[in-house]
Image (cartoon, rainbow, N blue to C red):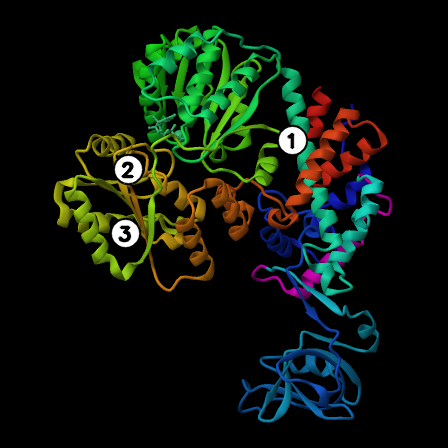
Amino acid sequence: MRVMRPPTLNPLFASLSTLPGIGPRLEKLYARLLGRESEKPRVVDLLFHFPTGFVDRRNQPKLSEIRPDTVVTVAVTVNRHRPPPPHRPRAPYNIDTFDDTNTLTITYFNARRDYLEKLFPVGETRYVSGLATLYDGHLQMAHPDRVVDEAGFANLPLIDPVYPLTEGLHSGQLHRAIEAALNRLPKSLPEWQDKAWLERNAFASFAESLRRVHRPQSPDDIKPESGPWSRLAYDELLAGQLALALLRAHQRIRAGRGSAAEGRLRARIITALPYALTPSQQQAVTEIVADLAQPTRMLRLLQGDVGSGKTVVALLAAAQVIEAGRQAAFMAPTEILARQHFSTVAPLAGRAGIRAALLTGRERGRERDETLTALAAGTIDLIVGTHALFQEEVSFRDLALAIVDEQHRFGVHQRLALAHKGEAVDLLVLTATPIPRTLVLTYFGDMDVSALREKPAGRQKVDTRAVPLDRLNEVIEAVARALDEGRRVYWVCPLVEESELVDLAAAEERFGALKKRFGDRVDLVHGRMRGADKDRAMARFAAGEARLLVATTVIEVGVDVPEASVMVIEHAERFGLAQLHQLRGRVGRGAEQSTCLLLYKAPLGETAKARLAILRETDDGFRIAEEDLRLRGEGDVLGTRQSGEPGFRIARLELHGKLLSAARDDAAFVLSRDPKLSSLRGEALRHLLYLFSRDEAIRLLAAG
Ligand code: ADP
Ligand code: MG
């Protein structure tokens, strides 16, 4: 099977330095601008660099009609040059011009005389475009952004796109480069979209759409909702969905073993639980057990808000494969969480006769060796751990099920790595960020979803309040009262990426101050602590030896201390909505009425204000996730911007979300008829996969 890039695309995959005027220096700037610093920027990367706005050059008044402080494009005759006097070389360089209604002074600072004399020959007409202002009662235009003669005016774009730039790169250079890139578009690209569908949406071809976005005819062309932009967004989404569907089909083909069991172990665990499963927990277990019995590979997402009880569902899934004589791995994103999962799961597993062990980066020496040997021999049924489980030396006798908690912290590659540790490993992903439906599709393709929608019985809504930081003293008094009542309190200090050390210092300072006030009841836990110290602090808090735990966001995910009932979040305005929701979910887990205090620095910006309001209003994680998406754009919901997993370049999920489900259906439809992409449309779609760097999927096709 052919896995070569179609040669028609070669001009688009040529390095940017093949465009006129782009040498090594500019190439570096483009690499930065286009986010391709590790590889060379290509022509196609530049074509996918879209404008974020435009300058309207349609406003072409006579000088007497100009409204000051607007962008105008005017035809003027050059009257005379007034360079700065020799004794004041830093004074502005003025050029007097006129039309038949008024005069206009064009002003430059630090400009070269010979250059300006060439640009503005006395007695000739020039078209200048820029911001017109009134200075001392005279019309003035400083540094026009366009100066052209008659011929140039004929080519002047009336809607001039504005692009994001990077330091050292001028907009003129970028415009010229994009023009050159557009000229590289192949004349005869095959159409990979369904013709009827294109017609129904009045979408133009790929190449034509790109030309329209970069050479807009009207301001509407530049909007993400426009036809050209939507078509290209759909291309990008379809490429993504197709790649995911191919990956999934590939995994399905390679699957082939069911783990059938009667459910004896499951029943024993359920009997040992101090509570009854909620209906949606039962439902999820039923769905998972059915998947596990199938001879195809399971790819299932278990979505549930914080505290909705995913861990026990995961354990019940593990029990099922273990009863079938196979093994399960349960992987958590942090050391603390792995330990916590282990301490929850181990006793229950023990009651059912399941042999469980823990493996993180901190297990070393003999104990570790024994665990590894037992895993390979199959005398451990369930291993709980961190990404240490990915390591090469970890091998299983017969791994059947990989459970990954908080998947989005792991990349897709790691997900595959774990799956490769066994034969046709079933995958269950747990996520506490209730991911909006649109994003589920994006990141997980047609992964099946089980959702835990209700909270375990007896939970109460957390009383949430926003308090400005200048009322800190009142908050400390409230904490004092809570501590006196024997309650347990989290105090979270933000960690902002840029300066971990400064933030840490802030957390330590807060800890110091609270310790002065509350003494030994206060403890500190932060991301820079040694693992053992972290555990000790968490354990002291869980046991009630410490009652006030000052923490950086290391406690964000999953930590479970049901007795904690007060959550103070300092600088709440610095957190994302989903993150605040996660943090708040640490309290309100017991029967007690809980409180969450969002300390913010006034004044709040619009978005921060909206975030805190939503949080006070609802504790429905699904709704919060949708709002989060709306307020912040898709990257931040999953924290992908930080982890560097590529999002979309063209599609905006908040705007093109509807197209996403269409793309998913389309991908499924295409593959159902043409699983090898060998039909005419299939061949065309291969072009699409290359254009959006999804060609890895084509290699899967070849591997069969
Ligand atoms: P999460 O979904 O956030 O991972 P956990 O699995 O940590 O939630 O469960 C949160 C808490 O709820 C734990 O203390 C767990 O024992 C408890 N729990 C789980 N299921 C139920 C249930 N059906 N009824 C009551 N408590 C439950
Ligand atoms: Mg959890």
Q: Residue at x 34, y 60 (%)?
A: 601
Q: Is residue 125 above or below residue 168?
A: below
687 left or right of 139?
right
Q: Is residue 39 above or below residue 148?
A: above
Query: 145 or 534, which is in the foreground?
Result: 534
Looking at the picture, how far across and down is residue 613, in whole percent? 42, 54
Q: Is residue 169 magenta?
A: yes
Callout 3 amino acid: Ala
How far apart are labels 1 and 2 at the CA level? Answer: 39 Å
Looking at the picture, how far across and down is residue 422, in whole percent? 53, 14
Label drawn at residue 369? none
- Mark 1 and mark 3 lie on one chain; the one further toward the N terminus is 1
426 left or right of 334?
right
Callout 1 amino acid: Leu
Label drawn at residue 506? 3
Q: Quadrant of residue 109?
A: bottom right
Q: Residue at x 45, y 41 (%)?
A: 620
Q: Are marks 3 and 2 in contact (CB under 8 Å)?
A: no
